[in-house]
Amino acid sequence: MTDTSSVDVQTTPPDVKDLKDWRFEIDFEDIAWAVFDRQGESMNSLGHRPTLELASIISKVEDAADKGEVRGLVIISGKDNFIAGADIREFDNLGDTEQVAEAVTATIDLFDRIEKLRVPVVAAIHGYCLGGGLELAMACHYRIADREEGTRLGFPEVKLGIFPGLNGTVRSIELAGAMSAMQMMLTGRMLRPGPARAIGIVDQLVPTHHRLRWAARKAVLQKRKSKGAAWWKKLLRKAPFREFLVKQMRKKTAEKVREDHYPAPFKLIELFSEFGDSRRRMKAAETRLFAPLMTSDTARNLRRVFRLTEMLKSEAPKGTFEPLRVHVVGAGTMGADIAAWCVVCGMQASLQDLNDDQLKKAMVRAKNLFKKRFRTKRDVDAAVARLISDKDGKHIARADVIIEAIVEKLEIKQKVFADLETKIRPGAVLATNTSSLKIEDIAQSLKDPARLIGLHFFNPVPQLPLVEVIMGAGSREAEVRKGCAFVTAIRKFPLIVKSCPGFLVNRVLAPYMLDAVRRYQEGEPREKIDQAALNFGMPMGPLELCDVVGLDICKHVAETLGLGPVADSELDRLVVNGKLGKKTGEGFYVWEKGKPKRQKVSFDEDDLVTLGRDLVKPLIDECERALSERIVESADHVDAGVIFGTGFAPFRGGPLHYRNRDKRAAEAA
Ligand SMILES: NC(=O)c1ccc[n+]([C@@H]2O[C@H](COP(=O)([O-])OP(=O)(O)OC[C@H]3O[C@@H](n4cnc5c(N)ncnc54)[C@H](O)[C@@H]3O)[C@@H](O)[C@H]2O)c1
């Protein structure tokens, strides 16, 4: 990755002979080929210099087309992806709304010139074709994609707090119709080539990328042009159909996110609602609505979250440790899901437990997960075959990673590890999923205690993106890095945390949850507490979260962390009475059909705002303490861990970022 400080500030398009990010040639059949291959990058993204260079190419093709020297243009990639989107690293350099509008207008003009070229223009797509990359492809006259596994098309912009701003809103509706196009933009979902062809954003498919050049050449010679959406799909842009669609979209979007937290999808609906039936007006309004979104706090914070994900992924050394086989000891809640998830990610997993019934239950649960994750029976069967029930631990010696997830008892874990150490192969990662024991204590039974690390997964494993990689007092750095490589290989984010009670995530969650319990005990209605947290942007209220985690576990964690007094509290009373939350049907709430029964009451909005801020205060205080103790490397690591481990309002950019902004605002006032 280049850093933003090195962004090229050149403003005039270079000569096509001096391109750095593109290769350009006109072949013996008079077909022009623009091959995008960004210099010094593993992925193609559309930044300032590539766009300027593309402008040179287009000028050249315009000129050649006028003179009858070229029969068409093919835009293709020289890398494994077509274009993964606009270059996010440059977004923050754009400054204010006017500068954003100016920058996007220049690119929109370029795309319009592509659309107006007198010769056929074909986009030949392999790999990711996302965001600005898809907008460029849509400005071409015809799109061919290969059917390969990694090829995906989509508009992920809403995840960054914006919507497509290079006229992708207009063109996608023209190609796919309002229903499919809006759905694609509102959800940010990526489409495989088949569905992309079915909705009309791709015109032709070829089996592999080897066929792309030939198919593109043929499309140019035959002057193929996309047909656009069917007539009945075009009708949906007109009243009264449009109003009906808009109503449905608003309702569905509001069910998922709040407008004050994530305004982009609502602005996109507004754009379609007001200007959806006019290409010219929608094009103009797109930039007007897009520019303020781009400079909003929400978008800046979501870009920050994106950068945090990149930071976590970079903890893993590339290519040095590529695990294929995992052995999990303990087939309970955590172990069964960890093994199944590794299989979902393509690995082979063996699962060991003392108890046959646990193993059988784990296999059934895993199959259900595979059915959800894989589309074909063949893939499900292959996954089932990769998960091995291994009561006697016969596969230990072959595993690259061994994870222990048995009962939380020090002596039992020590015994298990002493035995494992005699069986594992050199170089294999040895890890425990303990949530409250010290790694260095467990490691005492090992001949090589520096080998042991923690891999702390969160429940439910398939859904939660973070794994804390725990560095015990004596753990070897190399083992920790291999742990990170493993976590990245199973498509999760690794966060390196020093061994300490509660690690990072549970440590900051516990005071937040206990403070909510205290407020409830002092008379604040539980619905008000949970609503205030939701309004703040937490994924779930703290009392509902207590019920979901289990009140016995909450109590245990509180005691482990020395957060007291828990005795005599409402938490203790409920536990003593066997009301453990969701799993027993009652805790702070009564649970029916997996949902808490809430009283229908409404509260003053300002009160909720104040309460929301107060509720997260203990969590942020604890984040500051954790940072001062350096249990993770930096404030960014705290923010990343808390966002991905607790769901802390991503649009606020993380707890410490949020507090620092507040502090700066107070100083400025
Ligand atoms: N449950 C959670 O939410 C959660 C979250 C993070 C970490 N953890 C940690 O993960 C570990 C497992 O927790 P869990 O909730 O899955 O427990 P669990 O009680 O659901 O499962 C433990 C399993 O280990 C098996 N077992 C016990 N001793 C064994 C041995 N010597 N050899 C093989 N199998 C043995 C048991 O039969 C049982 O199936 C604990 O260390 C816990 O602290 C739990």
Image (tube, helix red, strand yellow):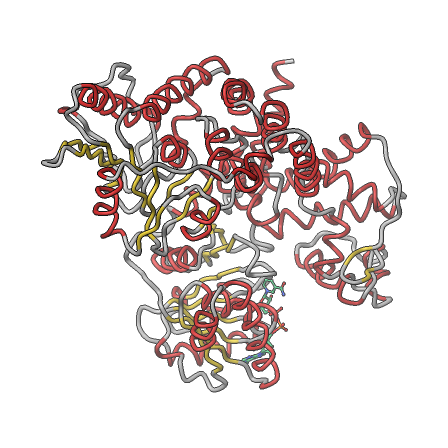
Name the side, left or right, on which 364 lies relative to 402: right
Count every numbered label the image shows and give the total: 0
Residue that appears at 54% across and 73% down: 367
The one of 207 and 156 positioned closer to us in this rendering: 207
The one of 313 and 444 positioned closer to us in this rendering: 313
Quadrant, the C terminus: top right
From the top left corner, tell me how far across and down residue 506 is, in percent. Answer: 62, 53
Residue that appears at 45% across and 42% down: 154
Q: Quadrant of ligand 1?
A: bottom right
The one of 135 and 484 positioned closer to us in this rendering: 135
From the top left corner, tell me how far across and down residue 89 is, in percent. Answer: 39, 30
From the top left corner, tell me how far across and down residue 620 is, in percent. Answer: 64, 38
From the top left corner, tell me how far across and down residue 288 is, in percent. Answer: 54, 18
Using the rendered image of the protein, determine whether residue 154 is visible from the camera's viewpoint. Answer: yes
Name the side, left or right, on which 508 lies relative to 140: right
Quadrant, the N terminus: top left
Reply above or below: 308 against 286: below
Name the side, left or right, on which 80 lies relative to 454: left
